[in-house]
Image (spheres, rainbow, N blue to C red):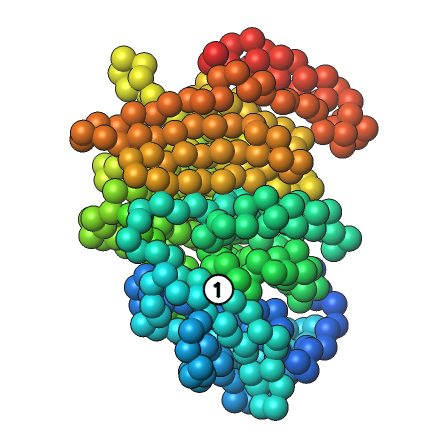
């Protein structure tokens, strides 16, 4: 009888704790704010250039126009020719509680390497302005791309200056990679703001985005919102067993995006897909992009399922670089051999969001950065892949190289003399003064033991 009372008491305590947790976390887990009313523009707009699903010589172009489906197409002109190619688009009417709009996407195939193209998108008698994009010179292995962590800008807009700055600083970059949370919420107003941020970039440079949790509709089973898929239209054809995954080759690199936001039972199929892509790749460089860090910088116990499913494959198949976000800080982790030498894979966490989260200082990591907006320029040339991280005001913050020569991998940390900038965000100082003091102490302890 006494044993039954003890068991009953334990069950009651567990239930009470469960209810308290659910009450505190309910909005985080399940609340989807009501979308504000919107009216789709009657003119073609919100243009997004991405990579295609038909090899290195393919590109996709997506856009929106009006709330009633009609014929859509892309008019494409290759430089040095006078012929205009007309490429028909697929379309999808998308409805929300706030309104409806039509998404279009066209697939451009068999494009010519080392060529420039001019295009515009058309619906009926209406069309956009003309834009240009280029295909790379395939006789050289040199290329570069810009990597952003979470964007999640506010509607008031705090990042326009950062994106304009990056566009001017790195005009010759080949493409842009985002690791998810491109938007703050899956709503038309946030998509509008995101396209304002990316103006002159999304129309001219291929954009690659892995899904983030802020692109999802919350529920017992989280579902990615379809307008994300139609905007990043390569997902329409690359989706694998309800996982929004994508891979593409660019020169001597294979770049793979995963969806770490899915419920754990989806990871089995996603892991199988990742293994097949890595096995088939014959490229020198392998880069994996996903939203949640393999090794969390927010908590010792976060993302354990993500690590268990994907990290063994990342290590087994020689992935060089893992690009991550979600935890709103900067962190770089370099794998060490048994004798302490730096090697691959290198794990990078970054963000450019106005929101700063508290970081957990883990001895596995080499560098941290807080209270800053970051972007990364990644360059590949011959035997070297080099990552340079910059703050939003163009200050070099991190610099590391991977060198592959004579069947050996060497990692060189070029940032040893660059100081780490660790600051307590103002929100902590104002709302949580005790927490701010503790956080400042943790920062100081980290700097005293951080690798030199």
> Is residue 387 among the parts visible in the rendering?
yes
Q: Residues within 10 Å of mark 1 (few under 14, many from 20)?
A: some
- The x and y percentages for residue 416 are 49, 17
Q: Measured along the vertical axis of the image, is residue 290 above or below residue 216?
A: above
> Is residue 325 among the parts visible in the rendering?
no
Q: From this viewpoint, which residue is outermost toward the front?
A: 80
Q: Quadrant of residue 439?
A: top right
Q: Name the side, left or right, on which 27 lies relative to 335.
A: right
Q: Nearer the viewer, residue 223 or 397?
A: 397
- The x and y percentages for residue 423 are 68, 23
The residue under label 1 is 133
Tag 1 secondary structure = strand
Residue under the image location 66 percent in, 80 percent down: 43
Q: Name the side, left or right, on which 97 lies relative to 402.
A: right
Residue under the image location 55 percent in, 20 percent down: 418
Q: Nearer the viewer, residue 421 or 442?
A: 421
- The x and y percentages for residue 199 are 63, 60
Residue under the image location 55 percent in, 69 percent down: 131
Q: Quadrant of residue 436?
A: top right
Q: Name the side, left or right, on which 166 lies relative to 80.
A: right
Residue under the image location 31 percent in, 30 percent down: 403
Q: From this viewpoint, which residue is outermost toward the right?
A: 430
């Amino acid at each position: 009888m006494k044993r039954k009372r003890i068991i009953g008491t334990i069950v009651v305590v567990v239930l009470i704790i469960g209810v308290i947790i659910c009450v505190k976390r309910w909005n985080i887990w399940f609340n989807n704010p009501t979308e504000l009313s919107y009216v789709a523009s009657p003119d073609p707009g919100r243009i997004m250039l991405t990579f295609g699903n038909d090899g290195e010589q393919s590109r996709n172009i997506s856009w929106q126009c009006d709330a009633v489906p009609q014929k859509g197409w892309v008019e494409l002109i290759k430089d040095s020719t006078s012929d205009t190619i007309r490429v028909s688009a697929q379309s999808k009417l998308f409805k929300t509680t706030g309104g409806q709009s039509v998404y279009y996407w066209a697939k451009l195939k068999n494009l010519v390497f080392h060529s420039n193209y001019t295009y515009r998108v058309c619906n009926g008698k209406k069309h956009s302005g003309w834009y240009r994009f280029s295909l790379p010179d395939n006789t050289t292995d040199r290329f570069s791309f810009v990597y952003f962590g979470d964007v999640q800008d506010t509607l008031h807009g705090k990042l326009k200056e950062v994106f304009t700055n990056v566009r001017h600083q790195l005009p010759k970059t080949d493409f842009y990679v985002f690791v998810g949370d491109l938007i703050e919420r899956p709503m038309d107003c946030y998509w509008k703001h995101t396209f304002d941020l990316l103006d002159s970039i999304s129309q001219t440079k291929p954009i690659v985005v892995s899904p983030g949790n802020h692109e999802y509709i919350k529920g017992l089973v989280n579902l990615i919102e379809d307008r994300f898929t139609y905007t990043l239209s390569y997902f329409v054809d690359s989706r694998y067993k309800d996982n929004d995954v994508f891979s593409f080759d660019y020169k001597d690199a294979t770049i793979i995006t995963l969806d770490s936001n899915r419920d754990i039972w989806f990871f089995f199929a996603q892991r199988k897909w990742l293994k097949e892509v890595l096995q088939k790749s014959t490229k020198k460089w392998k880069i994996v992009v996903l939203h949640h860090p393999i090794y969390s910088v927010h908590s010792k116990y976060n993302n354990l399922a993500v690590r268990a499913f994907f990290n063994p494959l990342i290590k087994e198949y020689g992935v060089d670089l893992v690009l991550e976000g979600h935890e709103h800080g900067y962190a770089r982790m370099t794998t060490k051999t048994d004798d302490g030498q730096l090697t691959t894979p290198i794990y990078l966490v970054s963000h450019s969001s106005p929101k700063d989260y508290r970081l957990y200082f883990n001895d596995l990591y080499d560098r941290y950065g807080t209270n800053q907006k970051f972007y990364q320029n990644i360059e590949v040339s011959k035997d070297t892949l080099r990552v340079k991280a910059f703050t939003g005001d163009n200050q070099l913050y991190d610099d590391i190289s991977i060198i592959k020569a004579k069947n050996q991998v060497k990692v060189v940390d070029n940032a040893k003399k660059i100081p780490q900038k660790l600051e307590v965000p103002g929100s902590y100082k104002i709302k949580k003064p005790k927490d701010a003091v503790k956080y400042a102490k943790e920062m100081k302890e980290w700097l005293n033991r951080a690798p030199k």
